[in-house]
């Protein structure tokens, strides 16, 4: 049963709206089994990037960094990332 937060009416599971006041009902929380995964996290820092891009035009910064992102993406995807 789902209790309406607006009027307190008990509604059957699966209802999206209260049968008494028609207020939207909060979805029934679903339980997900816990799962342990092995992950890899990659941190990259471009030396001097902040200083060189602070005053630059955003489009110019994006154009300068695009080849770097493309190269990283290629390597990451090669290893299933």
Image (cartoon, helix red, strand yellow):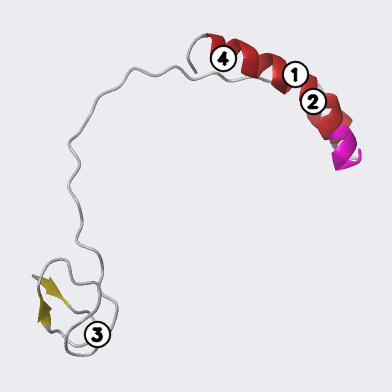
In front of the other: label 4 or label 2?
Answer: 4
The earlier-in-sequence mark between 2 and 3 is 3
Query: Who's the residue at 75% across and 18% down the image?
Result: 68
Residue 4 seen by the camera = yes
The part of the chain drawn in magenta is 56-61
User: How far apart are the two marked residues, 2 and 3, measured between alpha carbons?
Assistant: 51 Å
Mark 3 nearby-residue class (10 Å; few <14, some 14–19, many ≥20): few
Whether residue 46 is visible here, answered yes or no, is no
Q: How many marks?
A: 4
Indicate the position of residue 57 as horizontal and vertical percent values: 91, 41
Disc 1 designates what residue? 68
Q: Return the residue at label 2.
A: 65
Classed neighbour count for the residue bearing mark 1: other residues with Cα under 10 Å, few (<14), some (14–19), many (≥20): few
Query: Left of 26 or right of it: where is 47?
Result: right
Mark-to-mark CA distance, 1 and 4? 12 Å
Label located before the other in sequence (4 or 2): 2
Q: For residue 6, which numbered disc appears in the image?
A: 3
């Amino acid at each position: 049963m789902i209790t309406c937060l607006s009027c307190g009416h008990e509604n059957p599971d699966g209802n999206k709206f209260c049968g008494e006041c028609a207020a939207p009902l909060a979805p029934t929380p679903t339980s997900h089994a816990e799962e342990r995964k092995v992950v890899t996290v990659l941190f990259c820092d471009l030396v001097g990037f902040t200083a060189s891009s602070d005053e630059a035009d955003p489009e110019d910064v994006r154009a300068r960094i695009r080849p770097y992102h493309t190269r990283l993406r290629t390597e990451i995807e090669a290893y299933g990332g």
